[in-house]
Amino acid sequence: MSEIQAIWLLGSLALFLLALAGWAVSLARRATVIRQHLIAAVQDLGTGGFGGRLHEDEVGTEAAAAFNQMARNLDLQIEETRHSVEHLRDLAASLSDRVLLALNDDAEVDEVLGGLEELTGHHVPLVIGRHASFFFASEAEWKKVQAAALAGEQEPLAVALRRQDGELYNGLAVLRRRADGQGHLALMPPPGVVVAGQNESPSEARFSAFAGALPDGLAVVADGVIVSVSPRFVAMAGADEGELVGRRLMDLVVPSDAVTTAALVSAVPDAAGAETELTFRRPHGQTVTLGVTVGCMEDEGSRLYLLSARDISLSRGRRRRLEQTAAWLAAALEASEDGLAVLPAEGSRLAVANARFLEIMHLEPGRLPSAARLDAVLDRRFADGEGVRAFLAGRPDGEGGRLTTTFATQEQPARMLQLSRLPLSAAPGRSLGILVVARDVSQDSQARERLMERLQKLETAAGTAQEEGRRLAGERERLEQEAARLLKENGELLEREEMKTNMLGNFTHEMQNPLVSIRGYNEMMLRGDLGEITEEQRQGLDVALRNAKRLAGLVEQLMIFARTEDALTELTLEAFPVWVLLEENIALLGDRVKEKNLKVTTRYDTQRLSVLADRNLTSQVFSNVLGNAVKYSRDGGEIAVTVRPGAVDELVVDVRDTGVGIPRDEQDRIFSRGFRASTSGGTRGSGIGLALVQEILKRHGCQIRVDSRPGEGSTFSFTLPLAPDDDSGEVAPQSDHPAGVQPV
């Protein structure tokens, strides 16, 4: 890489990272602005400002439209809820001998409907937050009611209750629990007891209590005739009470629902709990479809059927609006990077919380905790749990003022969580609670610190880029000079290598003729062709002949080495049967095999025996490997040659002997030039044969390895490339067929 390229690369990298950092800062600022607008809009919702408050340029088109629509729907729902609550309280005011207590999942009283003071003597404000067992004569009585609720019993249970003055009295109680743990507890006097100031009969009083406590319209039917109706049922039916009481229920529905109506009000106990839809005929030909649930009860020996009716069209429309608004609100809450939660004006348990708030507070995902559970988590999460509870329990002062405080967690290293609270009110002077905003400011601070560190590193890198470029330029110049020097030295080495090779070739060629003459005359004198010789002369000539043969072998190896180095520069590849070349080389070693009384066998474990290689060089491989096996085998030993399939497109040749073996720590060096194993002893050799074999196989893309144990022999295994098509026409000898050379 040139200096200019290096400088350009570092500069481009620095600019890219600076641009990336700027983009990240811009996104962070934009997210902060959107979050501030959303929090301000939620605060406006809490103060009763339910009109459109967000603009497209503040949070985007989709978010603004969704939030503004949510605000309008929430306005309608709160107004409808206010009317429903007022109507429910008006109905509850008529109950003097019935009490309906709304319980949270800790069985604590959240709401009271009915004549609490008339029945128990307690005042409503003093029982809010009390445990339900407070009204019973003993804990055992309360547990009896709980057991009946778990068993699914619907009828009120006779229990012993306690008045405000401590007096015990008999009464009826029935408990209903929902899946989320919340429920309702109804308390009433025993049948036949009329509370002071109440002139209704027990049946009428019981119906009035149910009618006042339930938001649905109620009608009591006996023998198929309506005997009593609630005002809400009258409003739903669109007729006067006198037009309904005393009439058969079947006469009020459309003909298509007559069979269903008859089944609902039949004297069959199993009808209790049935649900269906009935279409009632209103005056002037109008109709209304009501969802009806049937309840069955005994009263003075007769069976009464209570029909709980609700306007399905109205509930469906409200449900759709509520679901749509809830979806918009949930989307807005979950989209916030901050934790958001609502604490109601009455009570200390969470009313609403998004997933981020639960995560920051280490609360269970998807579930709002009870008040006791929230306190325990705050003590475990924060170093000052008491301070956090006090902060959340307080109410902002002034006109919707916002209070913000930062608290440290107990974990190590500690994190800093910023808590903010904002007032929520439906109307001036009417508080709905507070909105709590939780933010992990330690993470933001760490992110800013990391960003500043990266920017500082980039500035440092950019400042040193030119200096590094100058250093690289000097280094490049030095490397160019070094390369020129190495190129020159390499040329000189090539020249010397060529001179050495030429000298080696000339030397071996010039040595060959004198050695032939020396061997020839020694052999003639040993045969007696030049006259009789003495025994001492014979021994001397025999020694001279053996040394001449050894020198001739060494010269021959040098000649082969010189020729092979030239031949390796360009391979002449051809396809030929490897077994033929193997048998030829074994035959050439016949005299030496007979001298040592060796047994040579061949085995072919595959039918694909045609290889694609340089035939002359491959023959040299067989000659050297087999020659070593013969040389280092003990007299009377065995040499086994196996040809078997190897990896894809390869043959493997194993040459196993029963020679002296090679030590394990020397096996990796056996293919080095001039190296001879320590176990070779007095066996003569040049130490270049196996190095030459390895070089030839490498040029063919093949390899050789050795597996040997001293005193047990060695196995040399090498690979050869298979020819694409085996069309040699030759047939290899059968497996375990002895080679052509047999021991004498």
Image (cartoon, rainbow, N blue to C red):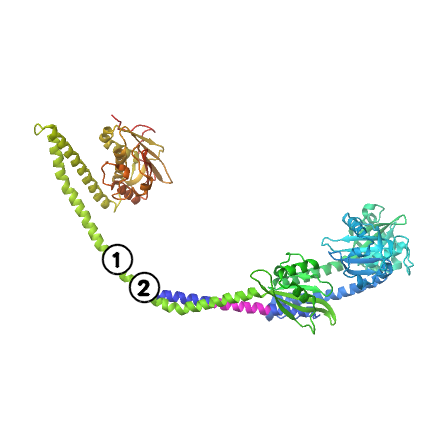
Is 729 contained in the magenta span? no
Q: Which mark is residue 418?
A: none
Question: For residue 661, what is the image quadrant?
Answer: top left
Q: What residue lies at 44% left-to-right and 69% top-to-bottom?
A: 459
Query: Residue 557's x, y, as percent?
Result: 21, 40
For disc 1, the marked residue is 486
- Distance of label 1 from label 2 (alpha carbons): 16 Å
Tell me: 725 left or right of 183. left
Query: Can residue 277 be spotted in the picture?
Result: no
Taking the view exactly as shown, the residue that stands out farthest to the left is 531
Query: Residue 333's x, y, as percent?
Result: 64, 63
For disc 2, the marked residue is 475
Mark 1 touches mark 2? (CB < 8 Å):
no
Q: What residue lies at 31% left-to-right and 66% top-to-bottom?
A: 474
Judged from the image, the secondary structure of the residue bearing numbered disc 2 is: helix
Placement of the C terminus among the 4 image quadrants: top left
